[in-house]
Image: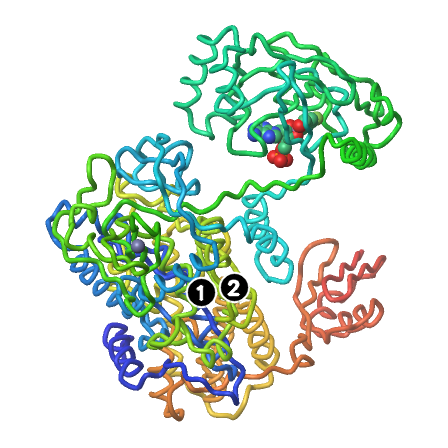
Amino acid sequence: MKYDFKAIEKKWQKVWADEKTFAAKIDHTKPKFYALVEFPYPSGQGLHVGHPRSYTALDIVARKKRLAGYNVLYPMGWDAFGLPTENFAMKNHIHPEIVTKNNVARFKSQLQALGLSFDWDREINTTDPSYYKWTQWIFLQLYKHGLAYKKEMSVNWCTSCKVVLANEEVVNGCCERCGGEVVHKVKSQWMLKITAYADRLIDDLDGLDFIERVATQQKNWIGRSTGAEVNFTTTTGDTLTVYTTRCDTLFGATYMVVSPEHALVNQWLENGTIQNADAVRAYQAEAARKSDFERTELNKEKTGVKLEGVMGINPVNGKEIPIFISDYVLATYGTGAIMAVPAHDTRDYEFAKVFGLPIVEVVKGQGESHLDKEAFTDVATGTLVNSGFLDGLSVEDAKKKMIEWLESEGKGHAKVNFKLRDWVFSRQRYWGEPIPMVYCEKCGWQPIPESELPLKLPEISDFEPGEGGESPLARHTEWVNTTCPCCGGPAKRETDTMPQWAGSSWYFLRYMDPHCDTAPVSKEAVEYWGPVDWYNGGMEHTTLHLLYSRFWHKFLYDIGVVPTKEPYAKRTSHGMILGENGEKMSKSRGNVINPDDVVNEYGADTLRLYEMFIGDFEKAAPWSTKGIKGCKRFLDRLWGLGEMIVPGEGYRPELETAFHKTIKKVGEDIEVLKHNTAIASMMSLLNDLYAAGGATKDELRTLLILVNPFAPHITEEMWQQQGFEGQIAHAQWPEYDEAKCVESTVEVLVQLNGKPKARLNLASGLDKDATLAAVKADASVAALLEGKTIVKEIAVPGKLVNLVVK
Ligand code: ANZ
Ligand code: ZN
């Protein structure tokens, strides 16, 4: 019988759907396991081959856990608000809701064709009012707890999308989605105070099983820095406070730098202190045009202007030092001002070289100094010099002593800073959750009553943002005009909507209880299913979605909605699938592989197997049509084995070790996402079975269960054909015996005068003498030795015997 994958896959997908084989229900008699993959944005392009890599990998884990007796939740849904849909809607004059519906339908049928064991009864969609009701509810709680606030601020503005971007969405000064130019613009924005959670977002990583690079990237992004604020005075009698991580080097500060936007600069410009005002204003204008990224680029030529008419005074020695403005000092970090220590900071060194400023050594290394060539930045080996009461101390001790001194003199104090900024939560677009706030002239910003949630998006047909960048909702006065919940007077609704990251910040909770209408998730459900046991997703989400959702979850923990501090116990990340040429898949390169085509030609089981076999899961891997064929061949041969049943029960003795070893290996490999090596070991077992003339029923049964998580359709079909009971999805993962995993025999190569002559299977564990004896006793070797004299014997037990003969 032919392996008709098309018919088989259709058949079993229908059975699983009809019988709700993978529906998850609370069951306190079993251990629970919640596997999660990042839900897709249902774009117009449909599924790409990257999606199945993540989804199949955890599908294998989910299926194996079910076979091993776990109660598994493996859900799927749609992260469907956002710009691409809105842009498509605008271009084609179709409402985003309809665009979303169509895209979701296509994605869903594509996913179902892959045989993923999702519980479709729990499907969620972030654009569904019954879902975003709770997104809005969470926003209101954040507001009520002082974590949402409105602020006039300079924001990243994409000139092409006409939308405000979060810092995270600006890549190399360009818009992350469209590549358009990003400029600064002052706007009044809703902000979320993620910075209030900065410490906890770092510290709580310790208890989690996140792969190293994810944890490190989150820590670096949050950027906790321990240092000091030091108050310098100026010749004008003002105080200029700097932030430094190296207060030990205060004696080496030979000039100061303030950001071009610093308030004191503008004050000095206004009151006439600055004598070279034109040059200063020109430099300010130039800096305003640059992105923070450009400004802090390490290798760029340092520029700046000295402020004529004012000097800073170093608090440790009373020395007057010049003050510059330069764009390498950012307004948004620390105090927006620094003390410059060119001898020990690379950027200050470069700046000092350009402007001919003094370089004073205050930390000395073990060898000779090379301050004529570069700054000395090693903090581990340095000793303080030229620094009065710090001389002779290590950097670490000098920092402590300096902070004590600053604090006792009232000239500074220890200070922790973070790179993390509050989250800009406003978007001036239509296709997002309305922000449930109204503005009253009398009462200011007021939250709408929770009973009015969901605050639905009005039906409109013009999605273009206004010329000033205001939301299209602003034109719909019938929706905007409302009454104040506080005084009952006239008020206006907020017309900004939430960013795309809102809905995905809590979706993992909704899956646990998708129809709950009294809370985002019921206590019962979250206490049973939470936290997510294993979450897989892209590295690109590490500092966005993954951080945002940890923040929201921590907040929900603080207000008693969820019982755990963290949403995800474990996080892994997959590498990208590249084109056959090793380049990123893209339309313009013409190297895009469509999963539908692969499913049509080879079947979903082959696609699944291939995407797992393609290489190490964490690494990028190029597509290979040859590799696909190899996986298809494996399934063809597995199918053929169904017609090669040999008599006998259990595992035949010569195959016993192979079975126990493979069961162990496949089980262990799945737990660490080494699906590629698991597949290799099953391929090798199949070869062994072919070599042994076929499989006993029991052998086939075990092999089918091992392959099932990887290739679920073919294994269900063969299971049924063999008359095994029930569905293989309800079978039990086979056990192995550790003692039987070791080979009972080893192959030993026999050489005469260094030339290979024979390969013998000897009992394993023999020592040198026993190995030699066994080799010489073998009839074929004895025949070779006839009439010859052995002059030397070399034996490597378990591997090789070389006999030197005459
Ligand atoms: C003096 C000094 C001497 C510094 C030295 C470093 C080495 P992190 O670790 O990133 O927090 N800095 C402070 N505020 C800045 C701003 N707004 N823009 C640009 N640079 C700023 O780095 C803190 C260090 O970066 C601070 O310590 C300051 O330079 C600089 F041998 O102060 B340091
Ligand atoms: Zn009012």
Which circle's residue, 2 or 1, is located before the other in the chain? 1
Residue of label 1: 57
Q: Position of residue 780 (x, y in %)?
A: 68, 71
**Most foreground residue, 608 or 568:** 568
Asked whether the viewer can see residue 515, the reply is yes
687 to the left or right of 626: right
Screen quadrant of the C terminus: bottom right
- Amino acid type at circle 1 is Ala
CB under 8 Å between discs 2 and 1: yes
Q: Residue at x 54, y 65 (%)?
A: 558
Vertical placement of residue 440 versus 413, above or below: below
The CB of the residue at mark 2 lies under 8 Å from ligand 1: no
Ligand 2 quadrant assignment: bottom left
* Quadrant assignment, res 712: bottom left
Label 2 residue SS = loop
Residue of label 2: 673
* Quadrant assignment, res 467: top left
User: Badge 1 local density, few (<14 within 10 Å), some, or many (20+)?
Assistant: many
Q: Position of residue 263 (x, y in %)?
A: 51, 25
Q: Position of residue 539 (x, y in %)?
A: 47, 50
Screen quadrant of the N terminus: bottom left
- Amino acid type at circle 2 is Leu
59 to the left or right of 353: left
Label 1 residue SS = helix
* Quadrant assignment, res 183: top left
User: Badge 2 local density, few (<14 within 10 Å), some, or many (20+)?
Assistant: many
Q: Position of residue 592 (x, y in %)?
A: 29, 48
Asked whether the viewer can see residue 677, the reply is no
Q: Residue at x 44, y 59 (%)?
A: 144
